[in-house]
Amino acid sequence: MKCPYCTKIDNKVIDSRLSKDGRTIRRRRECVACGRRFTTYEKLEDVMPMVVKKDGRREPFNRTKIISGIQSACQKRPISVTRIEEFVDAIELYFQELGKKEIDSSEVGEKVINKLKEWDEVAYVRFASVYRQFKDINEFMAELQDILKSKQDPEKS
């Protein structure tokens, strides 16, 4: 590890601590050459599956894209950034543990839409309107009616 102050490579680890989630190690280091201290973080490299889009294109799993989509749907809604990030962490871990090399984008979308339905109806409808690509107001109204029915009869949802 190169010292950020003098750029020498020779340093020693003074202290190591595991992060709360157990997936990152924080190391406090001291440069042997200049004596200054600095912190590094060590994280296991994640091997994420490729996402197969509806049109057949493949792209790397992108947590930032998922967070952005959820944040757009949750704009001005009572859902914290921490809650969103924890959910995306769980999605990421789920797909990583599946061990598949490829996953359909619909698998990711369904996990997101189901969680939004659980969290907030407005965020759910916002996300659904883009994800399900409503063609007209009738499709949008049908989705809203489904929500209203499930509120009136919770046994069916």
Image: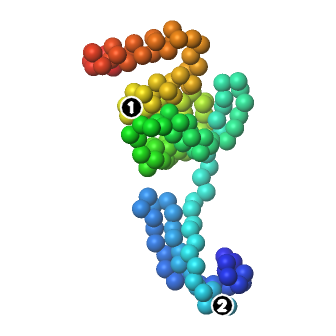
Mark number, residue 135: none
**Colour mode of the rendering:** rainbow
Percent coordinates x, y for residue 142 in the rendering = 45, 11
In the rendered image, the vertical position of residue 2 relative to residue 152, given as above or below: below
User: Residue shown at 68%/85% (left/top)?
Assistant: 10
Q: Which quadrant holds the N terminus?
A: bottom right
Say which residue label 2 marks: 34
Q: Position of residue 97 (x, y in %)?
A: 52, 44
Q: Residue furthest top?
A: 138
Label drawn at residue 120:
1
Asked if the residues shown at circle 1 and circle 2 are in contact, with their CB atoms under 8 angstroms apart, the answer is no
Q: Nearer the viewer, mark 1 or mark 2?
A: 1
Q: How much space separates mark 1 and mark 2, taking CA atoms?
A: 54 Å
Q: Residue at x 50, y 27 (%)?
A: 126
Neighbours of disc 1 within 10 Å: few (<14), some (14-19), many (20+) = some
In the rendered view, does 59 fall on the left or right side of 41?
Answer: right
Left or right: where does residue 20 sit relative to residue 136?
A: left
Name of the residue lying farthest toward the front = 76
Amino acid type for the residue under numbered disc 1: Asp
The C terminus sits in image quarter: top left
Q: What residue is shown at x 46% (from left), y 72% (from top)? A: 17
Is residue 114 something that shows in the picture?
no
Q: Position of residue 90 (x, y in %)?
A: 46, 45
Percent x, y of residue 105: 60, 30
The answer to which quarter of the image holds residue 67 is top right
Q: Is residue 151 visible?
A: yes
Tell me what residue is drawn at x 67 percent, y 41 percent: 60
Disc 2, SS: loop
